[in-house]
Amino acid sequence: MVSRSLSSADHDVIFQVPLLAALGEERLKTLLGTCKVESHARGEHLFRAGDVAEYFYILLSGHLRLVKTSSQGDETVMHFLTEAGSFAEAVSFAGRSYPVECQVVENCEIVAIPRTAYLGILKSAPDVVGDVLASLLRWERFFLEEIYKLRHTRPIQRIAAFLIDFEDRNGGAIDGTSGKNFPDKRQIASRIGITPETFSRSLRKLEASGAISAGPKLQILDREALLELAH
């Protein structure tokens, strides 16, 4: 891992993170004065399950995944992180251990924010607590949507919705030959709660419809058709 000082471009990205923007410019500059931009290579871990959550993080660039490993060694992908933004805030604020591990899928740059420094500033600025709590609610909404999808949508819908959402979050830069590729098929199946066998069958149906090309790299061929299948 190598590190560098924050640039003005980094500050611009960080100032768009609601959790940090709520502090106000001067308080945020004070907080960031102790921080560095860390570069991590593919295959590294930012943290492992059980590590005490002394930091929460800002992803500036790259691709991460959050993984839960069972006692039998089976991995479940909980979330892919590809957009600039914050993560691991709630567990850090609670002073608990990370419940998942964070793996680097593509080389990334992150900023680690010390929980003690952030909470210290927050205690001195009670007027911004409401805005901070509001920004944390996005994770609650996210997981409520995940529960709904698992209970009320068909596998083919979940796959179609995932592909559309992933492409949207990556600026439409996915074309199978350049830009950001979709995650590995096994990882997608794990992420959306589908067995590999069901995932393969659903992919064949999507490919037969002309909406996607299923291999060796996933590609969206007909976005409108995929949108219809996602609903």
Image (cartoon, rainbow, N blue to C red):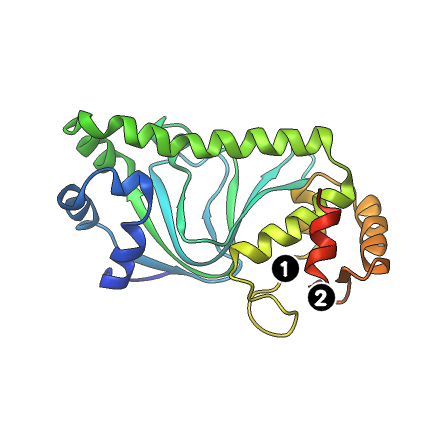
Q: Give me the residue at 22% from left, 30% from top.
A: 128
Mark 1 lies on a secondary structure that is loop
The image shows residue 180 at horizontal and vertical percentages of 56, 65
Q: Label 1 amino acid?
A: Phe
Q: Tell me where residue 178 sits by quadrant.
A: bottom right
Looking at marks 1 and 2 on the same chain, the residue that comes earlier in the sequence is marked by 1
Residue lying at 63% horizontally and 59% vertically, measured from the top left:
182
Does dot 2 land on a helix, a strand or a loop?
loop
Q: Residues within 10 Å of mark 1 (few under 14, many from 20)?
A: some
> In screen coordinates, is 190 left or right of 123?
right
Q: Residue at image x 86%, y 50%? A: 201
Relative image position of residue 32 (x, y in whole percent): 21, 49
- Which residue carries the number 1 mark? 182
Question: What residue did someone put label 2 on?
Answer: 217
Q: Is residue 134 above or below residue 226?
A: above
Q: Are marks 1 and 2 in contact (CB under 8 Å)?
A: yes
